[in-house]
Image (cartoon, helix red, strand yellow):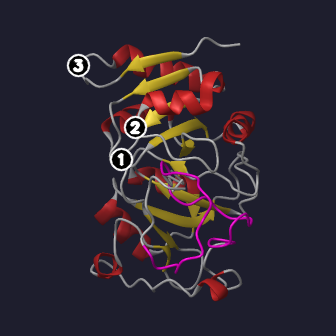
Amino acid sequence: MSLVRIKDATDPGTWGPAIDEAVNAVSRGELVVLPTDTVYGIGADAFDPRAVQALLDAKGRGRHMPPPVLIPDVRTLDGLATSVPDGVRALADAFWPGPLTIILRAQPSLAWDLGETRGTVALRVPDHRVALALLRRTGPLAVSSANRTGRPAATTVQEAYRQLGASVPVLLDGGTAPGGVASTIVDATGDVLRVVRLGALDLEALNAVTPVEAPLPPQETADAPGTGPGATEPGATQPAAAAAQPDVTPSDGPAAAPAPAGDDERVDGDR
């Protein structure tokens, strides 16, 4: 069993060795814990199916709840997604890095297996310097909240360790995560851009950039085309929402209600 190492990543002037250890762990197919702009996340190489499965196992989560993917910058978008609408590019330019997750059609040629995604992928660029420093070295990471499914999301590296234990050999300590409100999720797989979960960004902010439809009522969302498979149904096959937020049982409240980051992944922190 790997030795668990909590590495100080609070100071950019001295965090080089800590980032190196995390990069090496990812390259070996191991998991890492990293801070994000919402809560702490658990990450794996998005192109290593065994590592992604290890992430799901560590959380006690099935393949029907695939993790979102964190990327280092908007330039990575076209390599992972296809048929990217102009409106998505406008939103990404306006709100990345930041609390916006976008569900897109995944590039069909990609050699990855994130779970039962139905050909979609949820992408986000986090607004956190440690996460971005790591992503620039590793490339895309599958990231979910650093907690066991159904338990509160971790806002400190110590909380993440208590929940995940020896399943994660390298944990980056970036100090206390902000927690707060989860990312807003926009589905771009249909004929229109549509919010499937309101979070840190409201409809007014989105529509100031490009037209985005309001969330459908819960009873309509599950069957409506273009809203993202199972995006509001607990336990349904769905693309993961935001990276780095918590995984708690979704509520039965209105789809338009802002999602608190510390109470579900909502880190899917999306995350």
Q: Is residue 240 left or right of residue 7?
A: right
Residue wearing tag 3: 13
Say which of 115 and 192 sits in front: 115
Characterize the local packing of mark 2: few (<14), some (14-19) or many (20 or more) Cα atoms within 10 angstroms: many
Residue wearing tag 2: 131
Is 201 located above or below residue 25 in the figure?
below
Name the element at disc 2. Answer: helix
Task: Tell me which residue sits at (38%, 60%) in the image.
Answer: 181
Amino acid bearing label 2: Ala
Is 174 located above or below residue 230 in the figure?
above
Amino acid bearing label 3: Gly
Q: CA distance from mark 2 to mark 3?
A: 15 Å
Task: Tell me which residue sits at (44%, 56%) in the image.
Answer: 261
Characterize the local packing of mark 3: few (<14), some (14-19) or many (20 or more) Cα atoms within 10 angstroms: few
Residue 20 appears anywhere in the view: yes
Amino acid bearing label 1: Asp
Q: Which residues are magenta?
A: 229-257
Residue 69 is situated, as x and y percent measured from the top left of the image, at 55, 49
